[in-house]
Amino acid sequence: MPRARLIFLLLSLCAFGAAAEPRPASLRLCTEDMDAPPWRSQNGPSLSLQILKSAAQRSNIKLEIREMAWVRCLNEVQNNQLDGVFEISFKPERLRIGVYPMKGDAADPAMRMHLDSYSLYRLKGSPLEWDGQSLSHLEGAVGAQTGFSVIAQLQALGAQVDDSSRNPEQNLNKLLARRIGALALPTLTGDSLLAGNPAYRDRIEKVGPDLVAKPYYLIFSHRFADGHPKLTRQFWEAIAQTRDTPEYRKALQDALRQLNR
């Protein structure tokens, strides 16, 4: 083989080797161990799992999902014990936990898993008001699930927050017992719980506009994203592609219709 051709071949192999990325055996993700219909549910649609499984097939990687307390999930991703966490909204301080699909200084909504909102719930007959800008006539603390991003917003509104429980039904029971003056829940979760339980529906109502609406993401641990940058980007793109398929859009419409019955 001519010397020049041999050198070219060796350089090409070196370049290919440098560009090659190690392939992990599986992608280990965590999420909260509480139902959040329609995204996660033991007895109904679980659209987040559907979109992740489809993205895993598109990316040709095995998927492992672990459910655990939200704070523990975040800690394990931050400590690189797991590869990522899904259904997490963007806050700049959460960049220490893991890597978002960024666009400028914020997460790119085009790479989201889904959109969701938080709403405020009160006892029927309560004087509490929420006009989208300020809270008035609040009697007591506002309940929120442990570790959820809405806590900071409630505190910015001047509310005292009780985030001692991570279970939405326990928080609804606190509201019934008047241990809190109001409750902030993800809207679809709150509406579903009220619709499915007359004890809640007869005494509790949603008040005012959404507290906030935001996109939710899959983020990767810093170790995983640094070690597998191509797979990280590929998986985010696979999520976006799956989210825009007619099959997924129909599943979402069907799930929302079921929740609103």
Image: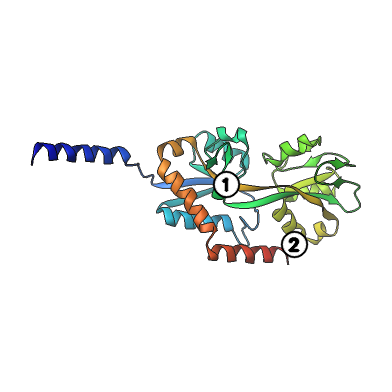
Badge 2 marks a residue whose secondary structure is helix
Badge 1 marks a residue whose secondary structure is strand
| Disc 2: CA contacts within 10 A as few (<14), some (14-19) or many (>=20) | few
Q: Quadrant of the C terminus?
A: bottom right
- How is this picture coloured? rainbow
Judged by depth in the image, the label closer to the viewer, 1 or 2, is: 1
Q: Is residue 125 above or below residue 98?
A: below
Who's the residue at 70% across and 50% down the image?
117
Q: Is residue 66 visible?
A: yes
Closer to the chain start, of discs 1 and 2, is: 2
Instruction: List x then y, in percent, for residue 202.
Output: 85, 59
Q: Nearer the viewer, residue 55 or 193?
A: 55
Name the residue beneath numbered marker 2: 196
Instruction: List x then y, in percent, for residue 134.
Output: 83, 41
Instruction: List x then y, in percent, for residue 194.
Output: 77, 58
Amino acid type shown at disc 2: Gly
Instruction: List x then y, in percent, for residue 79.
Output: 51, 33
Who's the residue at 76% across and 35% down the image?
155
Name the residue beneath numbered marker 1: 217
Amino acid type shown at disc 1: Tyr
| Disc 1: CA contacts within 10 A as few (<14), some (14-19) or many (>=20) | many
Who's the residue at 74% across and 54% down the image?
190
Checking the image for residue 15, the label placed there is none
Who's the residue at 85% across and 47% down the image?
177
Q: Is residue 163 visible?
A: no
3D distance between C-alphas at marks 1 and 2: 27 Å
Q: Is residue 114 above or below residue 248?
A: above
